[in-house]
Image: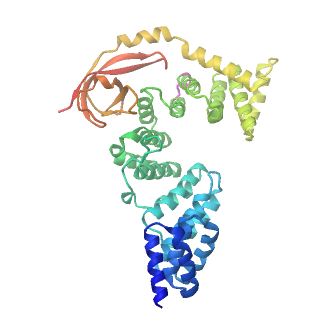
Amino acid sequence: MTNIAEQKQKANELRKAKNCGEALPLYRDLWKETGDKFDGAGLLHCLRKLELFDEALIFADELISKYPDFDWCRNEVIWTYIQGMLDKFDEEEPLEKVVEMTKRIMSLNPEGLAAKMIVFRVLKSAKSSNHWETVNEWVVKIDPDSLSAEPMMDDSGRERWSDQALWYNYRINGLVEKGDTKEAINAVDEILERFPKQRKFFLRLKALANHLLGNLPESEKIYQNLCSGYKPDWWILHEYAKVVRDIGRREDALKLMYQAASGQSKLESMVSLFADIGMLCKELAKYEEARAHLVLCKYVRNEKGWTVPEPIINTVDDLNRIIGNNKEPSSLKEALSICRREWSQLLCKGSDSESLSYKNRKVKKGLVGKVNLCRRDHPFCFIIARDEQSFFCYKSDLPPDTIDGTEVSFDAIPSFDKKKNKESWKASNIRHYT
């Protein structure tokens, strides 16, 4: 007994000193000799830390069946399943397999970090699969107040989303997809000020919810403000265009879609945008442009090995009959060249007169907003006014001691963004708001 007691003490000391390599053989011998739950938990801990998962997973099954109520054993089994199976799944793992594995682990009642990792793994897989029913089912398994609101950092030192911000993003997205648009809007209003770095993404969800609710003027207002800053995201421009289209301003919508298309280089990301452009061009009797975009969509889908929706194939056939003898583009390169020419022509059309119209707008005085400093390596930033409109400014124009979220008063000078061919505003005379 004395030898066993000494061996237990030695194994525990080595384990606590994180020397699992030397502790492992001691725990193996102890488990064979005693079958004691503490020796079993120590053995599994060492197997897990040494990443000997082939053995650890088999032993975890044995240990949890023998000591299901012993917390240390249960926690070691939970982490063995997480690290040895769940973490080994790749990004393309079928959602059904991920859910099956996570349900098995959740049956052991994980807590804290373990529970968060399990639920977030399901949420990530479900979101990428557009399986929003699963998102709504799993997101409520965690209390957001238990999650950290501190932004995480990536390997390059850049700020990422906090766990709490990610949770609300999943939750509000799920509400929108479920059709609970009013609840989604209320949720955005409740948490918007908590996450200034993610303000754009939550406002976009509010705009999307208003669109689905049929409140097009409010949706347009939010999208307009989101797209008034520097280099708006192409996918937000696409959503904005669909709101404008539904309002009835189809020419304006087409111009926004062209702007979106010209702002992104990954063609596979834009197949739905090309399809929307094609259908809108057909409505506007721009038949050549419509066919070029739908054919481009078809070529990109074929190149990626994706199926081409039947409505696209049928519409191209209809357009070929309407257009007559002119052959459709014979390659992706030809279709893309035609489309890019159309984007350039429409976006440049009237730019000379529009670039001068900003001079007729009056200066806005005495505005109040909060500073969004954006990335540290950028010389510019934005001020988000109380009506959610965004105003460009240079960091050098800010008053001393300005930090992210500082409330300031300022004037807005009319400007024109030649790159995006649109009117804009520049903040000036910026001072701390008192």
Residue for point 50% across, 56% down? 120
- The C terminus, quarter of image: top left
Above or below 193: residue 38: below
Q: Nearer the viewer, residue 152 or 44?
A: 44
Location of residue 74 in the rendering, given as x and y in whole percent from the top left corner: 50, 75
Residue 250, magenta (yes or no): yes
Tell me how the rendering is colored: rainbow
Q: Is residue 109 above or below residue 129?
A: below
Read off the magenta span: 247-251
- Is 68 one of the magenta-colored residues? no
Q: Name the quadrant containing residue 282.
A: top right
Left or right of residue 429: residue 95: right
Q: Residue at x 48, y 8 (%)?
A: 352
Could you say where residue 394 lies in the image, as x and y percent from the top left?
Answer: 34, 23
The picture quadrant where one finds residue 321 is top right
Residue 198 at what x, y percent from top left? 41, 41
Predominant secondary structure in magenta? helix
Q: Quadrant of residue 28?
A: bottom right
Q: Please tell me which residue is depicted at 58% across the width and 24% down the height of the picture.
A: 262
Compared with 17, 185 (above or below) is above
> Can see residue 105?
no
Observer-nearest of 40 and 144: 40
Left or right of 148 on screen, residue 301: right
Count of numbered badges drawn on the protein: 0
Above or below for 17 versus 275:
below
The image shows residue 231 at horizontal and vertical percentages of 47, 26
